[in-house]
Image (tube, rainbow, N blue to C red):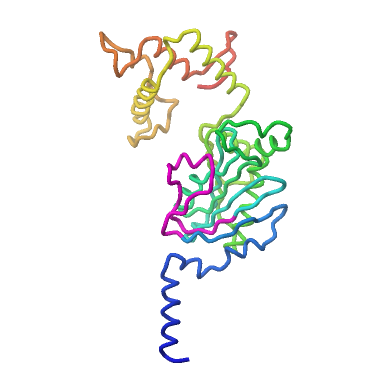
């Protein structure tokens, strides 16, 4: 081999290792995950996402949360597959792994992967996983056709799929990195919040920590509360709150509640200690903008709750 030929080979190798594929060129394990056997699991995709340019998310209802060009520029190994009969999942394994796992939840009745939440986790160095909970929805967040005639899907959605995601994501992670995570976490909001509560109650060993945001727990009373709010709108339309009034209440409440936790940082950490009352926003004199009418202030107080039955039973917390 001539010196010139040797130099060209060296230069080509150097260019490869210094480009966006460098980490994956040095780590050949991603594609090999597709050949690994995991309990009751089929791996359908194991591909290296090189990073550096936008990789657009596959189709998902959750993509609306990331805008029209939903994607990520992170570098990671993307592993996708199916657990059991039809629980689709993905696990993303970043090059700059921080040693931790952060799995993410769903919302509404969705059967979709939460790519925006996964992208945020990977950007912070977490390995992350998501599942469609065993059914597919493409129309909206509360599509329910998938339920009819499929009791197994209800079991998957309400508690089983996220437990199986926890088990499988840990196995995939260990196969890729050669060691387990040192901490595992879960984060979800709304339906994802009650999925987190369910994980804590049924499978407490799955995670070291759980963020259960705005958990849509106790579904019977939650839906009853919605019926109650609809009735209030019909019986007293003068108290109905539009977008402008909701934004006014939210902004004012956040500002007042922010001061109660000792740190003015845009976060209300102790809402139960917040002194805010909707009545403080009632219009004064002849003013009609940037304020609430007395019926609207009364409605806001009712919505804050808690809601009680005529006999005094607490139907849903404040």
Left or right relative to 84: residue 136: left
Residue in the picture at 25% in, 9% down: 286
Residue 54 at what x, y percent from top left? Answer: 43, 54
- Picture mark count: 0
Left or right relative to 92: residue 280: left
In the image as oriented, which residue stretches furthest toward the bottom? 2
Residue 113 at what x, y percent from top left? Answer: 56, 44
Tell which of 208 and 25 is nearer to you. Answer: 25
Res 140 quadrant in image = top right
Q: Is residue 139 above or below residue 316?
A: below
Residue 56 belongs to the span the image colors magenta: yes
Residue 105 at what x, y percent from top left? Answer: 56, 41
Residue 274 at what x, y percent from top left? Answer: 40, 25
Residue in the picture at 43% in, 43% down: 68
Which portion, as a residue range, is magenta?
A: 51-79
Tell which of 208 and 179 is nearer to you. Answer: 179
Residue in the picture at 53% in, 22% down: 317
Residue 213 belongs to the span the image colors magenta: no
Tell which of 263 and 188 is nearer to you. Answer: 188
């Amino acid at each position: 081999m001539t010196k010139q030929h040797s130099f060209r080979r060296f230069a080509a190798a150097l260019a490869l290792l210094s480009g966006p594929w460098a980490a994956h060129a040095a780590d050949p394990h991603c594609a090999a995950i597709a050949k690994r056997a995991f309990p009751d699991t089929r791996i359908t995709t194991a591909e290296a996402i090189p990073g550096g340019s936008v990789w657009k998310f596959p189709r998902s209802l959750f993509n609306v949360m990331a805008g029209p060009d939903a994607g990520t520029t992170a570098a990671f190994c993307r592993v996708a597959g199916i657990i059991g009969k039809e629980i689709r999942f993905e696990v993303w394994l970043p090059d700059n792994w921080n040693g931790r796992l952060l799995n993410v939840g769903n919302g509404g009745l969705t059967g979709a992967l939460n790519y925006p939440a996964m992208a945020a986790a990977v950007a912070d160095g977490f390995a992350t996983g998501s599942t469609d909970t065993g059914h597919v929805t493409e129309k909206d967040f509360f599509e329910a056709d998938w339920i009819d005639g499929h009791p197994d899907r209800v079991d998957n959605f309400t508690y089983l799929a996220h437990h199986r995601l926890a088990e499988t994501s840990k196995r995939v992670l260990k196969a890729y990195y050669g060691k387990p995570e040192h901490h595992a976490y879960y984060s979800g909001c709304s339906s994802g919040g009650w999925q987190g509560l369910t994980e804590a109650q049924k499978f407490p060993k799955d995670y070291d920590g759980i963020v259960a945001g705005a958990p849509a727990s106790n579904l019977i009373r939650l839906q009853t509360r919605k019926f109650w709010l609809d009735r209030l709108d019909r019986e007293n339309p003068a108290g109905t709150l539009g977008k402008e009034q909701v934004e006014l209440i939210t902004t004012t409440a956040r500002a007042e509640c922010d001061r109660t936790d000792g740190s003015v940082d845009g976060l209300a950490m102790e809402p139960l200690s917040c002194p805010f009352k909707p009545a403080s926003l009632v219009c004064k004199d002849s003013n009609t903008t940037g304020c609430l009418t007395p019926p609207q202030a009364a409605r806001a107080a009712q919505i804050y709750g808690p809601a009680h039955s005529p006999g005094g039973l607490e139907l849903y917390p404040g």
